[in-house]
Image: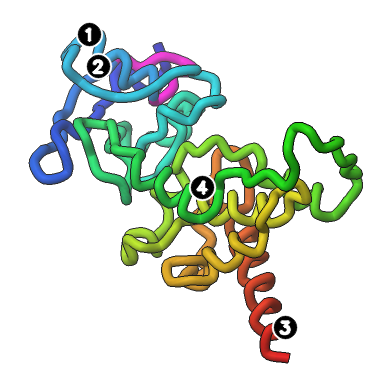
Amino acid sequence: MTQEHDTLEVSVWRGDADRGQFETHRVPAYDNQTVLDVVSWIQQQVDPTLTYRFACRVGMCGSCAMTVNGTPRWTCRTHVNKVLKDGRLDIAPLRNLPVIKDLVTDMDPFFDKWIRAGGAHAPSASRHDPIVEISPQSEGRATADAGIECINCSVCYAACDTVSANPDYLGPAALQRAWTVVNDEKHGDRQAVLDTVSAAGGCHNCHSMGSCTMHCPNDLDPLGAILGLKRATARGVFKRRR
């Protein structure tokens, strides 16, 4: 047991987006306890109907992302003693996504936008063509690699106020993926991606507040990627006007 708290006061969202409420429980407090440990304890010891997602428990899958005391986080990598406020936790589903039940959100809108932004790879050659060597030192390779560790946990999407205000906005994860493929020399139609992200709901809707980069659990920089798309699409406009 921890010295400061023998138990924690934990409020967990139950229900869906239209109908639900927070339920409060007293949960035993332990050293090195994560928020996911707390949720699992409630489900295993108090109410087996509590619904939530998790898989790897080590920060590799991103499926356990929830809102903890108002901030989107991976709960498996978030230690309770770092996020407690006045000895309590409020745990809710991620913002900006439809709630299916309790702490589980519908990820379809997130992934639909990822595809809409051109996130799927378009090959520039067939399997019958020789493999083209790309230098690891090339600028495009380095830029593409900078965002490749995104695991689509949607924490940045939940943190984004522009998504909240504009449901058509593609969001930081989709735009970061677009920036990755735009800089991928193996991608078959990079201009089509730029055309897509410069349209309504694309990169120019971003207000550059930086919540996406601030909250990214993998220390990626979606805002930097969006700014790169803004520059690239602006250059394309000026080139066409010459």
**Residue under pointer 2:** 42
Residue carrying label 1: 45
Residue found at the far bottom of this picture: 242
Q: CA distance from mark 3 to mark 1?
A: 63 Å
The three-letter amino acid code for the residue at tag 3 is Lys
Residue 52: x, y in percent?
29, 24
Q: What amino acid is labelled 4 in the image?
A: His
Mark 2 Cα shell of 10 Å, populated few (<14), some (14-19), many (≥20): many
Q: Secondary structure at mark 3?
A: helix
Q: Residues within 10 Å of mark 1 (few under 14, many from 20)?
A: few
Disc 2 and disc 4: Cα gap in Å? Answer: 26 Å
Residue 215 image label: 4
Query: What residue is drawn where x is 78% and y is 50%?
Result: 185
Please provide the residue range marked out in magenta: 28-35
Sequence-first tag of 2 and 3:
2
Residue 100 position in % (x across, y down): 21, 35
182 versus 36 height, above or below:
below
Category of crowding for the residue at label 4, using alpha-carbon neighbours closer than 10 angstroms: few (below 14), some (14–19), many (at least 20) = many
In the image shown, does 242 or 171 lie closer to the viewer? Answer: 242
Q: Quadrant of the N terminus?
A: top left
Predominant secondary structure, magenta span: loop
Distance from the alpha carbon under mark 2 to that under mark 3: 59 Å
Q: Which residue is mark 3?
A: 239
Percent x, y of residue 103: 27, 31
